Amino acid sequence: MRALPAFLAFPVYLLSLAPWPRAVHAEPLQVVASIQPLASITEELGAGRVQVHALVPPGASPHAFSARPSDRRRVARAALLLRAGHGVDAWCARLLPGSEARVLNLATLPGSAAHAWLDPLFVRDAVAPALSAAMATADPAGRAAYALALSSFQRRLGVLDAEIRHSLAAAPSRTFVAFHAAWEPFALRYDLREIGSVEGSAGEELGPRSLAALLQRARAAGVHALLVAPQQDARLARTLAAEFGARIVQVDPLGDPRDPRRATYPALLRYNARAFLRALGDGP
């Protein structure tokens, strides 16, 4: 067999060094998450192989969300559906009939609680491994890539936890009042104490007597801030804060991809840690 001419042999050599096109998984893995934090965690773990969509839009409350026919179709096409569980996204159950999507419900993970994604170590030790395994099952060709992304994300979450713990250790108070009962996992992780909330974890508000008792406890405890999320009634929050001489401090359990301060999961946790530091009396 005759050798190739030199001007042809060199391009052939270059082609032999180029990465082979990814034919096994040409299309990204389709993942649907009920809420933005779960979508953000998926993006961290997806190794560039995943396309994820959050059903609840930025600024909306999952408790008041009403899924559309297009959401049902999107879930039906997805390889994986992520749910928060614990009543946060109960409407997801209506999207499942006829869907082939695998479901990962945080409520089924050991140690889970409502709003458990607000505890970065729970995400590191429970949510991230379960989600990585689910994506690898749906996309076996990406198993090694998912494993590397998981290891990197878990290391960064350990650093994030230490950072938040260090910043909140200097707060002069450990007691807070939040409009919505989302913050127990965060409070337990960082040795904070919630003396009550205006709205329960499933979105129900306190009755007049219970609300009056909460305001009395807030005054007695010397709480000077009310933690309020963008999804909540701002006018009611201002009225309640005035009742016990408190200022409004914005927190956000859900995040917003349009705001760089809250667009990724680590950014969201840092945003909330800074807000808590202000509410607890130390921080701009």
Image (cartoon, rainbow, N blue to C red):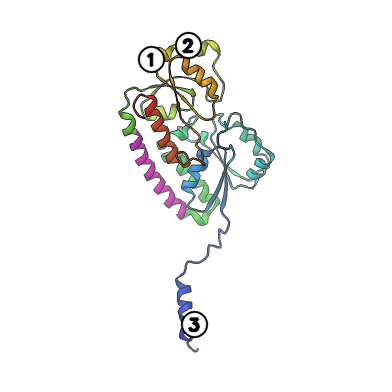
Residue matched to label 3: 8
Residue 13: image x %, image y %?
Answer: 45, 77
Task: Find out whether the residues at labels 3 and 1 contact each other: C-beta distance under 8 Å.
Answer: no
Helix, strand or loop under label 1? helix
Neighbours of disc 2 within 10 Å: few (<14), some (14-19), many (20+): few
Q: Residue at x 50, y 20 (%)?
A: 238
In primary-sequence order, the first of circles 3 and 1 is 3
Residue matched to label 2: 213
Residue 255 painted magenta: no
In primary-sequence order, the first of circles 1 and 2 is 2
| Amino acid on which disc 1 is placed | Ala
Residue 221 numbered mark, or none: 1
Which portion, as a residue range, is magenta?
Answer: 144-164
Q: Residue at x 55, y 58 (%)?
A: 25
Helix, strand or loop under label 3? helix
Question: In the figure, is residue 144 to the left or right of 76?
Answer: left
Task: Find out whether the residues at labels 2 and 3 contact each other: C-beta distance under 8 Å.
Answer: no
Residue 104: image x %, image y %?
Answer: 54, 40
Helix, strand or loop under label 2? helix
Residue 9: image x %, image y %?
Answer: 47, 81
Question: How much space separates mark 2 and mark 3, taking CA atoms?
Answer: 84 Å
**Closer to the camera, 165 or 276?**
276
**Closer to the camera, 221 or 158?**
221
Question: How much space separates mark 3 and mark 1, taking CA atoms?
Answer: 81 Å
Q: Quadrant of the C terminus?
A: top left
Examine the image and state in which quarter residue 187 appears.
Answer: top left
Examine the image and state in which quarter residue 118 appears.
Answer: top left
Residue 153 painted magenta: yes
Q: Residue at x 56, y 54 (%)?
A: 28
Neighbours of disc 1 within 10 Å: few (<14), some (14-19), many (20+): few
| Amino acid on which disc 2 is placed | Ala
Question: In the figure, is residue 175 to the left or right of 260?
Answer: left
